[in-house]
Image (spheres, rainbow, N blue to C red):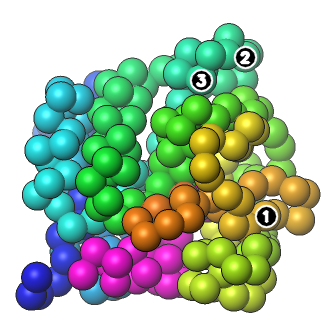
């Protein structure tokens, strides 16, 4: 392949969004995601929810896949009852993004899950989630910052070998790990901050939001793998 690799980023799907004189349903993506892809040397393409049966066809046209952050994963996806502080379901996103993950894993397409995307990767491989925790935001709608420590010998540690301060905003986290996943970074409180699949395919999930910071290393590693 020549030129910049094409990186597909999954999108939000909102029932009503306003811009100018319009207030309409919208598939959208915070600008930090495409900007991070571009800064890391890739071409960014938005991948809105579609019929899950088309996921393999979509992934076949991409060089890499990013599953973006967003709403909580519906607990039924990992065999749990909804707890009081779990957000409302985003069923179209859940179905579509799980299908994207499965297609990327089946095809060996490089895959990065960000926040919700990491949680969905864990769920796709049979893992479960903690439905509420404190201390990983700076308030409603305000990103926090904390350090993550890599696990030596992992793919993530090869990208960022030192303890790194990262932008974070989440209230759920990995509980039971999905099949074959390994933990590749922790927060000081023990929260799993990155997971990956060993082997030749490039598969990484990070619990933080690299699109909200200046560090391009994780996305650049995806782009290199997609090249």
Instruction: Give the mark, 1 or 2, whose residue is nearer the N terminus.
Output: 2
- Where the C terminus falls, by quadrant? bottom left
Inspect this view and state whether residue 2 appears: yes
Do residues under tags 1 and 2 come within 8 Å of each other at their CB atoms? no
> Element under label 2?
loop
| Dominant secondary-structure state across the stretch colored magenta | helix
Instruction: Specify the label residue 78 is tagged with.
Output: 3
> Element under label 1?
strand
Which residue occupies 37% across, 50% down? 105
User: Is residue 209 rendered magenta in the image?
Assistant: yes
Left or right: residue 147 versus residue 82 is: right
For discs 3 and 2, the disc positioned in front in the rendered view? 3
Instruction: Give the mark, 3 or 2, whose residue is nearer the N terminus.
Output: 3
Q: In the image, residue 20 lies at what x, y percent?
A: 17, 46
Which residue occupies 50% across, 66% down? 199
Q: In the image, residue 9 lies at what x, y percent?
A: 29, 56
Left or right: residue 23 versus residue 150 is: left
Residue range highlighted in magenta: 207-227
Left or right: residue 46 versus residue 2 is: right
Which residue occupies 35% across, 65% down? 110
The residue sitting at the right extreme is 189
Residue matched to label 2: 83
- Residue 26 is drawn in which quadrant? top left
What crowding class fits label 2: few (fewer than 14 Cα within 10 Å), some (14-19), or many (20 or more)? few
Residue 175, compared with residue 190, is above or below; it is above
Camera-side residue of 88 and 139? 88
Residue matched to label 1: 186
Camera-side residue of 19 and 151? 151
Q: In the image, residue 184 lies at what x, y percent?
A: 69, 67
């Amino acid at each position: 392949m020549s030129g910049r690799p094409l990186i597909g980023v999954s999108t939000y799907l909102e029932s009503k969004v306003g811009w100018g004189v319009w207030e309409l349903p919208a598939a959208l993506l915070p600008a930090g995601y495409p900007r991070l892809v571009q800064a890391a040397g890739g071409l960014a393409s938005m991948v809105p929810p579609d019929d899950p049966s088309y996921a393999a066809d979509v992934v076949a046209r991409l060089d890499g896949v990013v599953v973006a952050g967003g709403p909580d994963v519906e607990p039924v996806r990992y065999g749990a009852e909804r707890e009081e502080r779990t957000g409302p379901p985003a069923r179209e996103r859940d179905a579509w993004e799980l299908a994207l993950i499965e297609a990327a894993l089946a095809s060996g397409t490089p895959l990065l899950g960000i926040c919700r995307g990491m949680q969905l990767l864990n769920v796709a491989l049979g893992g479960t989630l903690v439905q509420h925790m404190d201390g990983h935001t700076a308030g409603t709608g305000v990103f926090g910052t904390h350090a993550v420590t890599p696990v030596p010998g992992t793919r993530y540690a090869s990208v960022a070998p030192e303890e790194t301060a990262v932008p974070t905003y989440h209230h759920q986290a990995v509980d039971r790990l999905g099949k074959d996943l390994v933990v590749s970074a922790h927060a000081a409180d023990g929260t799993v901050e990155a997971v990956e699949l060993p082997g030749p395919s490039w598969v990484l999930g990070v619990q933080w939001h690299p699109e909200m910071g200046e560090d391009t290393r994780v996305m650049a590693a995806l782009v290199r793998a997609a090249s």
